[in-house]
Image (cartoon, rainbow, N blue to C red):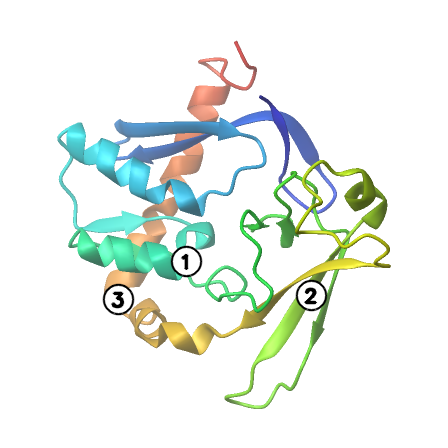
Amino acid sequence: DARTGHKSADSSFFGYKHHLAMTEEGIITAVVVTSGEAADGPQLASLVEKSHLAGAEFDHIVGDGAYSSRDNLIYAASQGCRLVAPLHPQISSPAPNRVEGFTYNKDAERYVCPAGHMAVRKVRGGRKDVGKNQVESHFFDIELCKQCPLREGCYKDGAKSKSYSVSLKSREHSDQLDYEQTDDFKDHRRKRFAIEAKNSQLKNPHGLARNK
């Protein structure tokens, strides 16, 4: 069940990821475990629901840019919460050639296909005028695509390239962009670093850097 995950375009690991929710005091309220290639953003709803079941009460959810998708912004609002996560254009916009299962890896700044393969390069095109949409295309290794068991409906036999494109439309999230400029957002954003200390505690003293 383990998969290859990426912390950058050049570094990878083989295994699993744990996604945490915790209070400001450092008490873990929810954990979701996935294989290594899984995106962080889709885990938000599960973490919030588990935290509620554990008795946690909160009106702000603090996370990094991986959690700032449109779906998560809508979900957080439905829970009466403010999502304190900076917008990232690649994960906050729908792709014109969207195929289910492609996810964005914020650390590597590349898309990952449903089979877990990361794009080998990316190219941005289109006009940079205000109000105009640019498109960023992520290209995959077609030698892997040709042999992929999930190629049907994704890779067309004989094609010389396989790409996944995304429109950069951050203006769609103007409310969140405005919120990012407020003192409330900035004050809560400063608390984001605390989760890294908790991850370090789990991986080192508690030995969760290795699967058991």
The secondary structure type at the circle numbered 3 is helix
* Picture disc at residue 137: 2
N-terminal label among 1 and 2: 1
Q: In the rendered view, would you say 128 is above or below 20?
A: below
Disc 3 residue crowd, few under 14, some 14–19, many 20+, Cα 10 Å: few
Mark 3 or 1, which is nearer the eye? 1
Q: Which residue type carries mark 2?
A: Ser
Tell me the quadrant of the picture where the N terminus can be found.
Answer: top right
Q: Are marks 3 and 1 in contact (CB under 8 Å)?
A: no
Residue at which label 1 appears: 69
Identified at 34% across, 68% down, the residue is: 180
- From the top left corner, tell me how far across and down residue 179 is, in percent: 29, 69
- From the top left corner, tell me how far across and down residue 44 is, in percent: 34, 43
Q: Which residue type carries mark 3?
A: Asp
The secondary structure type at the circle numbered 1 is loop
Front residue of 28 and 38: 38
- From the top left corner, tell me how far across and down residue 172 is, in percent: 40, 75
Q: Which residue type carries mark 1?
A: Ser
Q: Is residue 182 visible?
A: yes
Identified at 69% across, 65% down, the residue is: 137
179 relative to 124 in the view: left or right: left
